[in-house]
Image: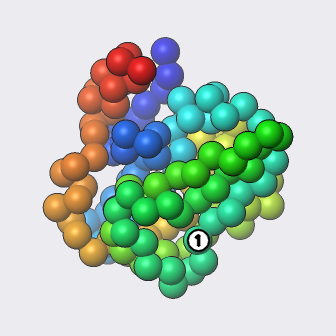
Amino acid sequence: MFECPEEYSYSQHHLWTHADPQSGIATVGVSEFLVEEVDEILSIDMPMVGDELEMDSLCVHLHRDTSIRHLQSPLTGRVTEINRDVLDNPNLLHLAPYRHWLFRMEYDEPDELEMLMSAAQYVRHLDHL
């Protein structure tokens, strides 16, 4: 069984989101399921601060030994910060995927949050994979 903290929302593409409605900023990271699935991550390509992302657009690329895993943005908005620690040391994601986030973004469409899954819904989603 994979850990899925209740305070996060999840995309079907295995990204978690923690949104702060007061600031309009969401923190985005990868789920424990995804980290286990990709095994070793050699490097990460992330969006740059200021980049505009559309929901479901490709935004992060995890480079593995033999392939690249492309990840899609869970929300529409602008990147406000990237996690340089994870950029420099992708293995931090394996140590604690819910503590080591990828990027933060100012989200434009609060209604998109309703399209993400709760932890319970995400667990059911994983059961069907």
Q: Secondary structure at mark 1?
A: loop
Residue 41 appearing in the image: no
Q: Position of residue 119 (x, y in %)?
A: 33, 33
Quadrant housing the C terminus? top left
Q: Is residue 24 above or below residue 85?
A: below
Q: Position of residue 39 (x, y in %)?
A: 72, 31
Q: Position of residue 26 (x, y in %)?
A: 39, 63
Residue 112 or 65: which is nearer the viewer? Answer: 65
| 15 sits to left or right of 97 | left
| 119 sits to left or right of 41 | left
Residue type marked 1? Pro
| Residue for point 22% across, 49% down | 115
Q: Is residue 12 above or below residue 83?
A: above
Residue 47 or 57: which is nearer the viewer? Answer: 57
| 71 sits to left or right of 11 | right
| Residue for point 81% across, 47% down | 42
Residue 39 or 98: which is nearer the viewer? Answer: 39
Q: Is residue 76 above or below residue 93?
A: below
| 111 sits to left or right of 38 | left
Residue position for label 1: 47
Q: Position of residue 90 (x, y in %)?
A: 75, 50
| Residue for point 23% across, 59% down | 112
